[in-house]
Image (tube, grey):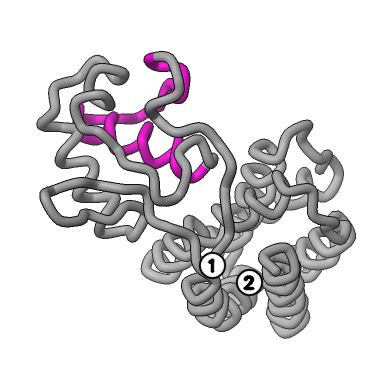
């Protein structure tokens, strides 16, 4: 099991962990988005308990939307509800990451292949901007966020909402491990060249090349996480 030596909710001052979240429609949406973001960014240790009342106080909400938010996070396997209604951040395990990447190795290339044939001219223009302006962020959280944003821009161009939703949920799991890998100082192979090759294939409409490159890129990410976990 991978250890994430980060802060838990009990050790941080109120509100310190949570960012402003745009487009939150209800109080439950707000609680869900902010708790979810804190988990994905590693601010809560895997296995640490999430106290509903403390979370509600930090978020300036009642316990009802927090409770509903935790139920949604449980359905996404980001938290686990134990006996006596205790809720903990889902532990990290290599079994989970292997299952996740096994599916991603099938779905990510499919999305890239479809994007190469289905992307609109505007989407191809935005990909071209990524080609010209990609610079790594200063922190692990920034780099994970940038990496996901680039891939989401590609996969979103496949114009298959079901596929994009499935991939997005798988990336939630994978990004937790990617963040751990970076925070632990693991040597990560440069991915800038990978991204250029993938973007060029999608922009040029080369579906088979795009799928092959994404498969190799995803397999490399999986191997890096496995090596770091060892």
Is 93 drawn above or below residue 127 in the view shown? below
Q: Earlier in the sequence, mark 2 or mark 1?
A: 2
Instruction: State how far apart marks 2 and 1 are (Cα).
Output: 7 Å
Identify the residue at horizontal 53%, vertical 41% (top origin). 42
- Between 212 and 223, the one lying in front of the other is 223
Residue 133 — which label?
Answer: none
Identify the residue at horizontal 16%, vertical 38% (top origin). 67
- The part of the chain drawn in magenta is 14-40
Q: Which residue is mark 1?
A: 158
Q: Secondary structure at mark 1?
A: helix
Where in the figure is residue 18, as x and y percent of width and height?
43, 24
Q: Is residue 224 left or right of residue 119?
A: right
Count of numbered marks = 2
- Between 11 and 220, the one lying in front of the other is 11
The C terminus appears in which quarter of the rendering?
A: bottom right
Residue 191 seen in the figure: no
Crowding at mark 1 (Cα within 10 Å: few <14, some 14-19, many 20+): many
Q: Are marks 2 and 1 in contact (CB under 8 Å)?
A: yes
Q: Is residue 103 left or right of residue 73?
A: right
- Between 94 and 105, the one lying in front of the other is 94
Where in the figure is residue 112, as x and y percent of width and height?
63, 71
Residue 23 seen in the figure: yes
Please state which of the two labelled residues, at mark 2 or mark 1, is closer to the viewer: 2
Identify the residue at horizontal 34%, vertical 60% (top origin). 77
Q: Is residue 205 left or right of residue 179?
A: right
32 magenta-colored: yes
Tell me where residue 74 sits by quadrant.
bottom left
Q: Which residue is mark 2?
A: 112
């Amino acid at each position: 099991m991978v250890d994430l030596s980060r802060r838990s909710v009990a050790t941080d001052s109120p509100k310190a962990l949570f960012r402003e979240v745009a487009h939150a429609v209800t109080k439950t949406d707000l609680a869900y988005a902010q708790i979810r973001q804190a988990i994905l960014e590693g601010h809560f240790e895997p296995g640490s308990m999430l106290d509903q009342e403390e979370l509600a106080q930090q978020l300036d909400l009642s316990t009802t939307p927090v409770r509903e938010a935790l139920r949604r996070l449980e359905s996404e396997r980001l938290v686990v509800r134990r006996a006596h209604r205790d809720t903990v951040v889902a532990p990290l395990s290599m079994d989970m990451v292997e299952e996740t990447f096994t599916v991603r190795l099938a779905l990510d290339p499919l999305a890239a292949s479809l994007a190469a044939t289905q992307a609109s001219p505007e989407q191809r223009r935005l990909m071209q901007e990524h080609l010209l302006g990609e610079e790594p962020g200063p922190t692990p959280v920034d780099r994970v966020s940038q990496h996901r944003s680039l891939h989401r821009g590609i996969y979103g161009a496949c114009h298959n909402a079901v596929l994009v939703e499935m991939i997005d949920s798988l990336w939630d799991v994978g990004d937790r491990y990617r963040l751990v890998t970076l925070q632990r100082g693991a040597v990560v192979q440069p991915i800038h060249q990978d991204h250029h090759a993938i973007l060029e294939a999608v922009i040029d409409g080369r579906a088979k090349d795009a799928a092959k490159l994404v498969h190799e890129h995803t397999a490399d990410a999986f191997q890096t996480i496995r090596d770091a976990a060892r």
